[in-house]
Amino acid sequence: MVTAFIYLKLPTHALPRDHQWEDRLDGALRQAGAGTVIGWGESLGDAPPGQMRPLAFLRVDIETNDLASARQLLHDWLPVAGVPQGTELHYTLDRRALQDRLEATGWRLALDGHPTARRAPPR
């Protein structure tokens, strides 16, 4: 059985107030047979000169043997849990790095997971 990895990235501007939601997410994944949370933590951004590094995002690492089921559970469960818009699910499918992103209108699916190259402004 192939094991897949999902990296859940939550912006910090509106994180759920309940700091136990990662445990509830793990329980929901396990109960559905859709995976398990294998870790979570905070990631820091770049520090402005002379200041401490700010919190950039919260990350949750998920392992699954059924990527489609895990994604569906996450798409349904996360908005109900109160995660903010801009939350991203990063995963690999057919050797392509992809992401689903929660927006005001719902989930945008299978977006290119690599940062978009920025073009230099015209002169």
Image (cartoon, rainbow, N blue to C red):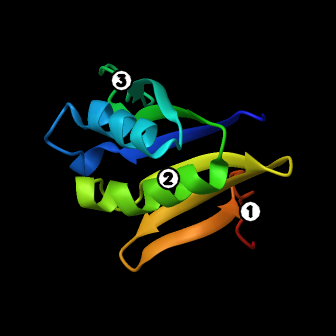
- Spatial separation of the CA atoms under disc 2 and disc 1: 27 Å
Could you tell me if residue 30 is visible in this image?
yes
Q: Which residue is mark 1?
A: 120
Residue 120, percent across and down?
74, 62
Residue 84, percent across and down?
30, 57
Amino acid residing under circle 1? Ala
> Foreground mark, 1 or 3?
3
Closer to the camera in the image, 111 or 75:
75
- Left/right placement of residue 7 relative to residue 87 reads right
User: Please, what secondary structure does the residue beneath circle 3 have?
Assistant: loop
Q: Which residue is mark 3?
A: 53
- Spatial separation of the CA atoms under disc 2 and disc 3: 22 Å
Where residue 60 sits, quadrant-wise, is: top left
**Vertical arrangement, residue 99 with respect to residue 92, above or below:** below
> Foreground mark, 2 or 3?
2
Amino acid residing under circle 2? Glu
Residue contact at pointers 2 and 3, CB within 8 angstroms = no
Q: Residues within 10 Å of mark 1 (few under 14, many from 20)?
A: few
**Vertical arrangement, residue 52 with respect to residue 46, above or below:** above
Upstream in sequence: badge 2 or badge 3: 3
Q: Residues within 10 Å of mark 2 (few under 14, many from 20)?
A: many
Residue shown at 55%/39% (left/top)? 7
Furthest toward the left, the residue is: 17
Upstream in sequence: badge 1 or badge 3: 3
User: Please, what secondary structure does the residue beneath circle 2 have?
Assistant: strand
Q: Which residue is mark 2?
A: 88
